Image: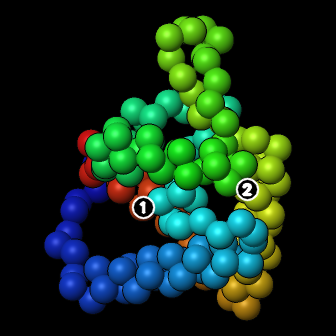
Amino acid sequence: MPERQQTSEDDVEAVLASTRDIGGLIARTLALVEPSVTMPQWRVIVLASDGGCNVSTIAADLGIHPSNATRLCDRLVRQGLLERRRADEDRRQVLVTLTEEGQRFHREAMERRRRAVTRAMESMSTADREALAAALPVFAAALAAGAR
């Protein structure tokens, strides 16, 4: 197992600055797609985009009370981006899934983000792109492990 070193404050600040920039990229790309959604609503759309999920999953992911997650979903249902349906394997469970409009919204937002990321990466050296692509999955796994 590799030796762990103390993380420097400069390294933490560099990652925090990058996450702010990535958050800004997400917000900018979402602002270009209609209808308008908030960042928590976008997270619900992302969670629902993989075949649907239940409100408990949404609440846990966002760190909010299930009643707040229900209200968040209600707004997306009213916007025509989500729908509720009974789970096939357990009819007692209600899933939120993307409507056709929700799928279009998700595709368009992701395509805009993909184009912005591609432009940024194309401005980087090959070595920097490779280092970034290697480091991000490791960082994401460390974030996920820390969330437990």
Snapshot quadrant of residue 66: top left
Q: Nearer the viewer, residue 135 or 49?
A: 49
Mark 1 falls on what kind of element?
helix
Label of residue 106 in the image: 2
Taking the spot 36% from the left edge, 80% from the top edge, the residue there is: 16
Residue type, numbered disc 2: His
Vertical side of 92 occupied by 146: above or below: below
Residue type, numbered disc 1: Phe
Vertical side of 15 occupied by 55: above or below: above
Sequence-first tag of 2 and 1: 2
Coordinates of residue 39 in the picture (x, y in percent): 51, 66
Vertical side of 94 occupied by 65: above or below: below
Coordinates of residue 30 in the picture (x, y in percent): 66, 72
Coordinates of residue 86 in the picture (x, y in percent): 61, 18
Q: Nearer the viewer, residue 139 or 85?
A: 85
- Quadrant of the drawing holding the C terminus: top left
Taking the spot 45% from the left edge, 35% from the top edge, the residue there is: 55
Viewer-side label of 2, 1: 2
Q: Which residue is mark 1?
A: 139
Mark 2 falls on what kind of element?
helix
> Marks 1 and 2: in contact by CB < 8 Å?
no
Taking the spot 73% from the left edge, 91% from the top edge, the residue there is: 123
* Distance between mark 2 and mark 1 Cα atoms: 25 Å
Q: Is residue 126 visible?
A: no
Q: Is residue 147 visible?
A: yes
Coordinates of residue 116 in the picture (x, y in percent): 73, 80
Q: Specify the farthest residue to the left.
A: 6
Left or right of 24? Residue 34 is right
Left or right of 69? Residue 47 is right
